[in-house]
Image: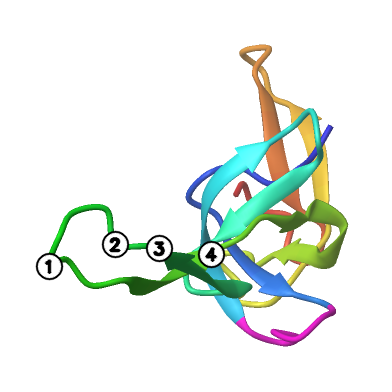
Amino acid sequence: MTNIKKGDLVKILSGKDRSETGKVLKVNTKLNMATVEGRNIVFRHRKPKKGGEKGQKLRIPMPMRASRLMVVCPHCKKPARIGHVTDEKGMKRRVCKRCGKNI
C-alpha cells in the first residue's frame, strides 16, 4: 500500500530526476508505482503508419517506484512522512509528520 495519491505534489529522492518535484498523474497500488508529470521521461519511437506520414519521437513519462517519492506537505511546503489519524467522525485522514496538519 502506498501513501501517495493522484494529484499529490511529490519530491523525487533518487535517480536521474533526483530532488525534482512534480504532480502525480497515476498510481498503481498493486505494483507500488506512480507516474509523475514531466519526470522520468523516456523516448518512444513511432513508425509511420500511412504513406507520406513521418515517424515520431514521443516523450512519455514512465512510472517509478513509490519508495523513490516523498509527498510535499501543502502547508509547510517541505517533503514529509505521512501519518494516519482517525478524526471524530471516524474518517481516516493523512497527516503531515512535520507540522501535524491534514494533507
Q: Nearer the viewer, residue 20 or 16?
A: 16
Q: Quadrant of the N terminus?
A: top right
In terms of secondary structure, where does tag 1 sit? loop
Identify the residue at image location x=84%, y=79%: 14
Quick check: 7 left or right of 31?
left
Per the model, the C-alpha gap separating discs 4 and 1 is 28 Å
Residue interval drawn in magenta: 14-20
Q: Residues within 10 Å of mark 3 (few under 14, many from 20)?
A: few
Amino acid beneath label 2: Pro
Q: On the image, numbered disc 3 is attached to which residue?
A: 46
Q: Residue 72: where, in percent of width, then height?
A: 64, 68
Q: Residue 102: where, in percent of width, then height?
A: 62, 47
Q: Are marks 2 and 1 in contact (CB under 8 Å)?
A: yes
Q: Earlier in the sequence, mark 4 or mark 1?
A: 1
Q: Quadrant of residue 92?
A: top right
Q: Nearer the viewer, mark 3 or mark 2?
A: 2
In terms of secondary structure, where does tag 3 sit? strand
Q: Earlier in the sequence, mark 3 or mark 4?
A: 3
Q: Nearer the viewer, mark 1 or mark 3?
A: 1
Q: On the image, numbered disc 4 is attached to which residue?
A: 61
Q: On the image, numbered disc 1 is attached to which residue?
A: 52
